[in-house]
Image (cartoon, helix red, strand yellow):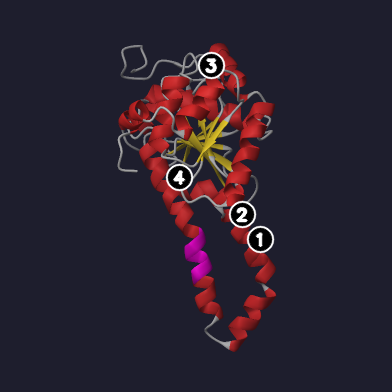
């Protein structure tokens, strides 16, 4: 983990990351799944597979449980610093993933901010809101707040990688926190223990809904191939589900569909206010 991804890739050409992605680039594999260093996987994927034409930066996707169907959140760690154009591209890729992999007919896209009003947020979110709202190719419903994610207010949540990674790490800690809290309360009295016993199946169901292992891994969208990044501490169940996610992405021809979406709808989007008629790059 302490190694520089670029240095490691130059020195370790026979690593599983380098070999696996090289196999995909030569057509010997349809997808690549790794629980290795995220930075190394991203660097190797960009070097070996390249970007889809029209995409400036790839984005890491995660699926969040909601009151109804899972919600697509991106970016959750690939890009700490973003520009409005990048978030517009994330919205296009996220909408494509929700539609073609998850089966949402016309996915609702929301921009993560600190308020619903278009004027709320920092400069990035304000300018990105104008880009998304100005596109008739997206089902953009406006800004969403953190509390809206679990409510299932939208199908796709767009944010920069710094904000998304904080959200992801908080969500991963939520399962253990809630499980521990329930166990402590259940031991408090005989009545609590009896109640916990009666609610055991409900608690197990809730844990499954919140457990990241149910999703397995996070797709890296925007590279010219199918790449799934898993947590370093992934269980066998998580790896199993990551392979299933990769298989589903290949079956739905996700890479081609994203490329087609970018060609048909334009990755630059409409001009952002304050950019002199051009999108900031």
Separation of disc 1 and disc 2 at Cα?
Answer: 6 Å
Separation of disc 1 and disc 4 at Cα?
Answer: 26 Å
Comparing 261 with 220, the one in front is: 220
Instruction: Tell me, for residue 191, which label it has, or none.
Output: none
Q: Residues within 10 Å of mark 1 (few under 14, many from 20)?
A: few
Q: Is 112 on the left or on the right of 238, as rendered? A: left
Q: Is 134 on the left or on the right of 190, as rendered? A: left
Frontmost of labels 2 and 4 is: 2
Q: Which numbered disc flags the more N-terminal residue, 2 or 3?
A: 2
Separation of disc 1 and disc 3 at Cα?
Answer: 38 Å
Q: Tell me the residue that label 2 is attached to.
A: 209
Residue 176 located within the stretch drawn in magenta: yes
Q: What's the magenta region?
A: 175-180
Q: Judging from the image, what secondary structure is the residue with disc 2 in?
A: helix
Q: Tell me the residue that label 4 is attached to.
A: 145
Q: Position of residue 215 (x, y in %)?
A: 59, 45
* Residue 64 seen in render: yes
Comparing 33 with 74, the one in front is: 33
């Amino acid at each position: 983990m302490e190694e520089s991804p670029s240095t490691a890739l130059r020195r370790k050409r026979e690593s599983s990351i380098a070999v696996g992605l090289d196999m995909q680039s030569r057509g010997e594999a349809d997808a690549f799944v790794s629980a290795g260093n995220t930075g190394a996987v991203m660097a190797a994927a960009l070097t070996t597979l390249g970007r889809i034409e029209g995409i400036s930066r790839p984005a890491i996707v995660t699926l969040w449980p909601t009151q109804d169907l899972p919600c697509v959140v991106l970016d959750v760690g690939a890009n700490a610093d973003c520009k409005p154009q990048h978030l517009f591209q994330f919205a296009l890729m996220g909408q494509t993933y929700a539609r073609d992999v998850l089966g949402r007919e016309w996915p609702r896209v929301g921009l993560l901010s600190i308020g619903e009003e278009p004027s709320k947020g920092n400069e990035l979110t304000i300018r990105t809101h104008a880009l998304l709202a100005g596109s008739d190719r997206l089902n953009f419903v406006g800004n969403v707040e953190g509390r809206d994610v679990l409510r299932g207010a939208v199908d796709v949540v767009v944010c920069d990688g710094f904000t998304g990674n904080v959200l992801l790490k908080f969500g991963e800690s939520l399962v253990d926190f809630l499980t521990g809290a329930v166990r402590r309360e259940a031991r408090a009295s005989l009545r609590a223990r009896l109640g916990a016993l009666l609610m055991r199946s409900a608690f197990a169901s809730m844990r499954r809904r919140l457990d990241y292992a149910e999703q397995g891994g996070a797709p890296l969208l925007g590279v010219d191939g199918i790449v799934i990044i898993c947590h370093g501490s992934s269980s066998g169940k998580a790896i199993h589900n990551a392979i299933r996610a990769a298989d589903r992405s290949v079956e739905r021809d996700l890479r081609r569909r994203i490329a087609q979406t970018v060609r048909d709808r334009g990755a630059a989007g409409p001009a952002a206010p304050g950019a002199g008629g051009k999108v900031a790059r």
